[in-house]
Image: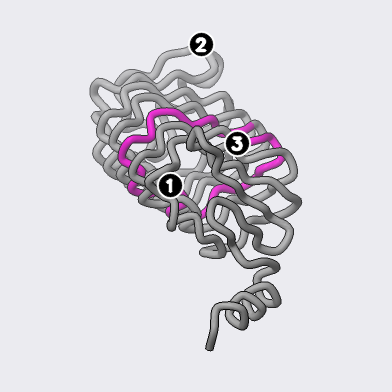
Amino acid sequence: MNVAIVCMILATVLGACDKGNSGRTGNIKWKVDKEGTLTIRGKGAMPENGFSWYYVEDKINAIVIEEGVTTIGAFAFGLLPYLTSVTIANTAISIGDRAFQGCINLDFINIPNNVITIENETFAECHNLTAITFPNSVTKIVGRAFRSCENINSITCHNPVPADIDLWTFRDINKNTCTLKVPASAVSAYQNADGWKEFKNIVGM
């Protein structure tokens, strides 16, 4: 089967055939610019495993997910070796399983104000992360979302009601030295909440 036929099939199934540094799957488009920024734009949810930017993974050092994207698909950006920063628009409400797992140089990500759920192992093995902030909207962090993020030393939670987490959610983070910042009125709630109460340095803000 020649390349033209393969592309026709992919265009039918996925919406487009990737061309070098850009492509499309359904309503979601992507492009890697010459500075190494991967931009995701479109309307709705990102499909799982539906993109081919891994052919240019060595060029990607930043990701920008624009307004209109509602869900970051499972396994979407895992194992990008040179990724250092991720910026996500406020239309996103969910970040999928292992979406950024193994992005070992990732040191900045904003979790937008409308995200409700962070799925299992979303940021596992992101060794360069040192701080993370959860907006008021986050109510559930699933499984081992931050496994092997041993360098995180500061966590900020804006929700006065502690999110539902697992005992393994923050596995490998030093809970004796990591500072957990929460609303001043919610310090007691976090000190008594499953998972969160493992942190020894819970401070109001």
Q: Position of residue 86 (x, y in %)?
A: 51, 35
Residue at figure coordinates x 33%, y 40% from the top left: 126
| Residue type pointed to by label 3 | Ile
Residue that appears at 54% across and 17% down: 183
Mark 2 touches mark 1? (CB < 8 Å): no
Question: Between residues 95 and 10, which one lies in front from this camera angle?
Answer: 10
Furthest-bottom residue in this view: 1
Residue 205, label in figure: 2
- The amino acid beneath tag 2 is Met
Residue ID for mark 3: 88
The answer to whether residue 17 is above or below residue 97 is below
Tell me where the magenta segment starts and ends, as one range. Answer: 89-112
The tag on residue 100 is 1
Task: Check if residue 110 falls in the magenta segment.
Answer: yes
Residue 53 in percent (x, y) is at: 49, 55
Q: Earlier in the sequence, mark 2 or mark 1?
A: 1
The kind of secondary structure the magenta stretch mainly shows is: loop
Cα–Cα gap, marks 1 and 3: 13 Å
